[in-house]
Image: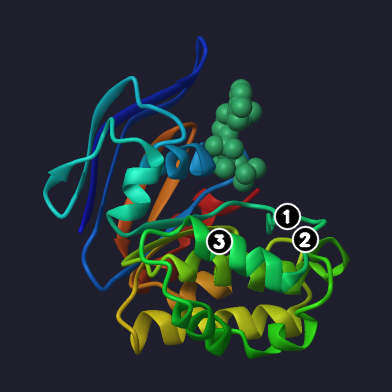
Amino acid sequence: MLSVSGVDAAYGRARVLFGVGLEVPAGSLVCVMGRNGVGKTTLLKTVMGTLTPTAGRITLDGRDITRMPTHQRVRAGMAYVPQGHVSFPQLTVWENLQVTLEATGHRDPAAVDEALDVFPALRQFFKRPAGFLSGGQRQQLAIARALITRPRLLLLDEPTEGIQPSVIDEIEGAIERLHREAGLTVLLVEQYLDFALRLADSFVVMDAGEVVHAGAVEELHDEEVRRMLAV
Ligand SMILES: Nc1ncnc2c1ncn2[C@@H]1O[C@H](COP(=O)(O)OP(=O)(O)OP(=O)(O)O)[C@@H](O)[C@H]1O
């Protein structure tokens, strides 16, 4: 479904990605791993089009999207949940969901219910400003907002970061159901190894802006891969 090949990216003159390549087959869950600062978020930004690569090619279903604006990528079926559970803090949960619905191409109100069925606990916080939610609730809201666009490919950047273990389980269960039951294709950036092991089909390890290892998730038990991830 998604193919990234030979991608270089930079912030001004600081090069961050060097010839990055990965494949995300339709229906798979691929996890990108690696230490802090190796370029995982930058890779997601280039896939989503908020940062334009300086070299390389990105295709979605065989179509070249390397220079396609982000909003067109959303229309093409991609959604991105950035790190830090971002929503509009002054707006209530309900308003956050409605604003997202307004921005979609389909504007089908049923999409809000579908997203809330994935995270039913959000219903009890409808009137609460997003800024007053816990980190875990904000993360659920951020993923729910992405789901309202009805994506086929979901990009998730460290969904467990700064979240308490009981809520991590809920988020893991939701991602698992979306992937295994609803067939959603997922590209996940995650440093929490056990979470990645339970969810992913395959993985990519990055180091210093390059892919240094890729394989089936069973290989994650290998000592060498664990060593590459060690801080
Ligand atoms: N907006 C920016 N401007 C300049 N440099 C940046 C910017 N964002 C990230 N960088 C640098 O690019 C490199 C890769 O950062 P990136 O956030 O992609 O890494 P990461 O693997 O996602 O790390 P983390 O796990 O800490 O989020 C780092 O050296 C970082 O300092």
Residue 6 at x, y percent in the picture: 24, 31
* Amino acid at pointer 3: Thr
Q: Residue at x 49, y 32 (%)?
A: 208
Q: Position of residue 157 (x, y in %)?
A: 55, 55
Q: Are marks 3 and 2 in contact (CB under 8 Å)?
A: no
- Secondary structure of the residue carrying tag 3 is helix
Counting residues from the start of the chain, the first of labels 3 and 2 encountered is 2
Residue assigned mark 1: 88
- Structural crowding at the residue carrying mark 3, measured as other residues with C-alpha within 10 Å and reported as few (<14), some (14–19) or many (≥20): some
The residue tagged 3 is: 100
Neighbour tally class for label 1: few under 14, some 14-19, many 20 plus, Cα within 10 Å: some
Q: How many marks?
A: 3
Q: In screen coordinates, is 172 left or right of 231?
A: left
Residue at x 55% of width, y 61% of height: 100
Q: Quadrant of residue 64?
A: top left
**Distance between the Cα atoms at labels 3 and 2?**
12 Å
Amino acid, disc 1: Phe
Q: Is residue 46 visible?
A: yes
Residue assigned mark 2: 91
Q: CA distance from mark 1 to mark 3?
A: 10 Å
Q: Is residue 34 above or below residue 129?
A: above
The quarter of the picture where residue 85 lies is bottom right
Residue 14 circle label: none
Residue 166 occupies quadrant:
bottom right
Where residue 141 appears, as percent x and y from the top left, is 65, 70
In the rendered image, the quadrant that contains the N terminus is bottom left
Q: Are marks 1 and 2 in contact (CB under 8 Å)?
A: yes
Q: Residues within 10 Å of mark 2 (few under 14, many from 20)?
A: some
Figure quadrant, ligand 1: top right
Residue 167 lies, in percent from the top left, at: 72, 81
In the rendered structure, the answer to whether residue 138 lies left or right of residue 221 reads right
Q: At x 74% / y 74%, what residue is drawn?
A: 137
